[in-house]
Image: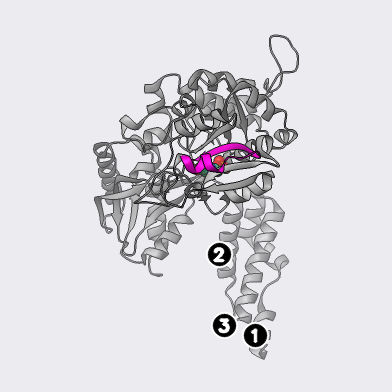
Amino acid sequence: MTPRMKELLRLLPSVSALLEHEEVSEWVNGLPRATVVASLQTALENARHAVLSGKITEPLDVQDLLARAEEELVARSLPSLRRVINATGIVLHTGLGRAPMCDAAIEAVVEGCSGYCNLEYDLHTGQRGQRASHVVKELVALTGAESAAVVNNNAAATLLILRTFATGREAIVSRGQLIEIGGSFRLPDIMRASGATLREVGTTNRTRIFDYEHAINDRTAVLMRVHTSNYRVVGFTEDVAIDAIAALAHRFSLIAVDDLGSGAMMDFSAEGLPDEPYVKRSLDAGADLVCFSGDKLSGGPQCGIILGKKDLIERLAADPLMRTYRVDKMTLLALEATLRCYRDREEAMVNIPTIAMLKASSEELAGRARALCEQLETALPDEKFFVCSDVGYAGGGSMPQRELQTVVVQWTPGNVSVDEMSRLLRQADVSVVARVRSDAICFDVRTIREEDFESLIASVSAAVWEGEPGE
Ligand SMILES: *Cc1c(COP(=O)(O)O)cnc(C)c1O
């Protein structure tokens, strides 16, 4: 440390001196004192680091220091986990919380959690009830399954199924389906954790029904199909349909499991949605157990939904580990409300945001993009915005590379780099996560609700203002 640094450090005010300032006493009036003190400490700590690293060579202005402390205070007053505007166009963005929930689900959570609810209480008998019962009826009615179970996520569903039916035995899976999703779901690891032995069959790009048949032996318990949307292996591929796998499994008294990943609750392929297998189709094809995520295409809360044969679901429910994966009341409230939206197909397509976003037509998107573009131009006449078509992605683990034709508002900021602007947008009061290209920022209107335009424009305006070269 140079003598100059020592001198600069000595000149830094103390926290108690800063607390004497008029504006700081105003902060203390409105906010917890401890939060104000912590913000001052952080600002001072940062200043000390700046001195020691040679970034500050002149005595620091107190107003400057207080401005830093105020920034820190603002940051601390925002919750860490909060709403953001998804302008990436990726409908099922795991980083941004996957499926946004439908209004009915939000209302159900607010209503059911503000007081008590009949989570495990049978209102007819006054006796203890089953927490899953609230959604099982709805799932059964919707899919024709014999029974259903719900756990925390689809990874847990897969683990429980393998644990219950294949521990100490073998599960046969096609080599082309040994998927890794988001870096954290690797089927071979799940297999190992479940105590089941993974029996890989076929090659990465081709697996035929006789590959499964040849692999069946005394220890085989499960034939499992994993839906991967074939995104990893494209071109010369061959897969066995669940119908054939189920028929083979039944011939040898084995269990056919279909991990659908996304699992559409209804067949929406005619509506231009990604052509994902829908749940009823798989059950009708003979799968004994089907599992999928609640927060992918279904558009509900995070959970893993298991459907299938009544006796198998009963065995699953009896697994002591089931208790460790049980879902909470918020999930069940949201899930039941979402499932009820599916009672009416038309209603589901309008009211479940995931479905509505995925099926939005090019005309609809173009109209929305023009409206956003005009509003941005009005708010920021010095910046240039354009509407153009682009390619977006559905996202969501099992279908990350499903391309969707989309429409974006494109913007090359006048004063700062694209990278710097995307940082400013992320850090705005209402954070905006946009798609960033080398030369432009794109706001993909597929995932931006019209009621979010105002907040988005406010965040863009604030970011432009912050990015202005200093006075
Ligand atoms: C997404 C996915 C999973 C994991 O589901 P989570 O709900 O994220 O735990 C498992 N299998 C497949 C095929 C998937 O697509």
Three-letter amino acid code at the position of disc 3: Glu
User: Dots 1 and 3: beta carbons under 8 Å?
Assistant: no
Q: Which mark is residue 5?
A: 1
Of residue 128 and residue 215, the one placed in the foreground of this image is: 215
Three-letter amino acid code at the position of disc 2: Ala
User: Which quadrant of the rendered structure holds the C terminus?
Assistant: bottom left
Q: In whole angstroms, how far apart are the C-alphas of marks 3 and 2?
A: 17 Å
Identified at 68% across, 44% down, the residue is: 194
- Of marks 1 and 3, the one in the foreground: 1
Q: Which residues are magenta?
A: 210-226
Give the mark nearer the N terminus: 2 vs 1.
1
Ligand 1 closer than 8 Å to the CB at disc 2?
no
Q: Secondary structure at mark 3?
A: loop
Residue highlighted by disc 3: 58
Q: In whole angstroms, how far apart are the C-alphas of marks 2 and 1?
A: 22 Å
Give the mark nearer the N terminus: 3 vs 2.
3
Identified at 49% across, 21% down, the residue is: 142
Of residue 274 and residue 445, the one placed in the foreground of this image is: 274
Residue highlighted by disc 2: 67
Q: Residues within 10 Å of mark 2 (few under 14, many from 20)?
A: some
Q: Residues within 10 Å of mark 1 (few under 14, many from 20)?
A: many
Tell me if I can see residue 15 in this picture: yes
